[in-house]
């Protein structure tokens, strides 16, 4: 399950994730940082870091800095917070409108830098 937008006005993303994870003990979830940026709910979603299967880093490259597609989340700080919460699994990069193939290298370098020296997504 991923923290995608919820159209039901009685639920918010973190409530829906909590509901599913509490009822399905084997379920893992994908944390999409772009949606967490849009809804400003990274912190409550990090409560479920032990159940993470993947972190989805979606954004646009501005020089050598990756910015979320929506919202104002600092992706470097968010990646560091995810790591500090104990997550050491894979990251998926979705680069919006890359100008060239070299942009992927710059985006991956940004993620690696956020994870710390020698680390890789």
Image (tube, rainbow, N blue to C red):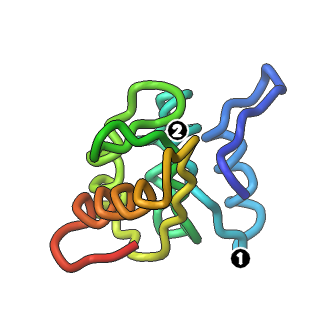
> Horizontal and vertical percent for residue 50?
48, 69
Left or right relative to 53: residue 102 = left
Residue at 53%, 28% (x, y): give it.
Answer: 70
Element at badge 2? helix
Q: Residue furthest right?
A: 8
Q: Which residue is mark 2?
A: 36
Mark 2 vs mark 1, foreground winner is 2
Check the image and report above or below for 34 versus 56: above
- Within 10 Å of disc 1 (Cα), the crowding (few <14, some 14-19, many 20+) is few
Residue 35 sits above or below residue 91 on the image: above
Residue located at (58% from left, 71% from top): 53
Q: Which mark is residue 73?
A: none
Q: Residue furthest left?
A: 117
Of mark 2 and mark 1, the one earlier in the sequence is 1
Question: Residue under circle 1?
Answer: 26
Position of the C terminus, as image quadrant, is bottom left
Residue 33 in view here: no
Gap between marks 2 and 1 measured at Cα = 23 Å
- Element under label 1? loop
Position in image of residue 29 (x %, y %): 64, 62
Q: Nearer the viewer, residue 65 or 10?
A: 65
Q: Residue 12 lies in what quarter of the image? A: top right
Say few, some or many: other residues with alpha carbon within 10 Å of mark 2 (under 14 / 14 to 19 / 20 or more): many
**Can you see residue 85?**
yes
Q: Horizontal and vertical percent for residue 103?
A: 42, 54
User: Which quadrant of the rendered structure holds the N terminus?
Assistant: bottom right
Outermost residue, top side: 9
* Residue for point 68% across, 53% down: 2
Q: Position of residue 43 (x, y in %)?
A: 41, 41
Among the 4 quarters of the image, the one containing residue 63: top left
């Amino acid at each position: 399950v991923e923290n995608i937008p919820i159209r039901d006005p009685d639920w918010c993303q973190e409530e829906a994730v909590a509901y599913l994870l509490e009822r399905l003990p084997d379920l893992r979830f994908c944390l999409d940082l772009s949606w967490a940026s849009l809804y400003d709910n990274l912190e409550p979603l990090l409560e479920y870091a032990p159940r993470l299967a993947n972190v989805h880093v979606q954004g646009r490259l501005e020089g050598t800095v990756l910015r979320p597609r929506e919202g104002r989340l600092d992706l470097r700080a968010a990646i560091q917070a995810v790591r500090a919460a104990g997550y050491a699994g894979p990251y998926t990069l979705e680069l919006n409108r890359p100008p060239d193939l070299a942009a992927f290298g710059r985006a991956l370098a940004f993620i690696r830098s956020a994870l710390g020296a020698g680390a890789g997504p």
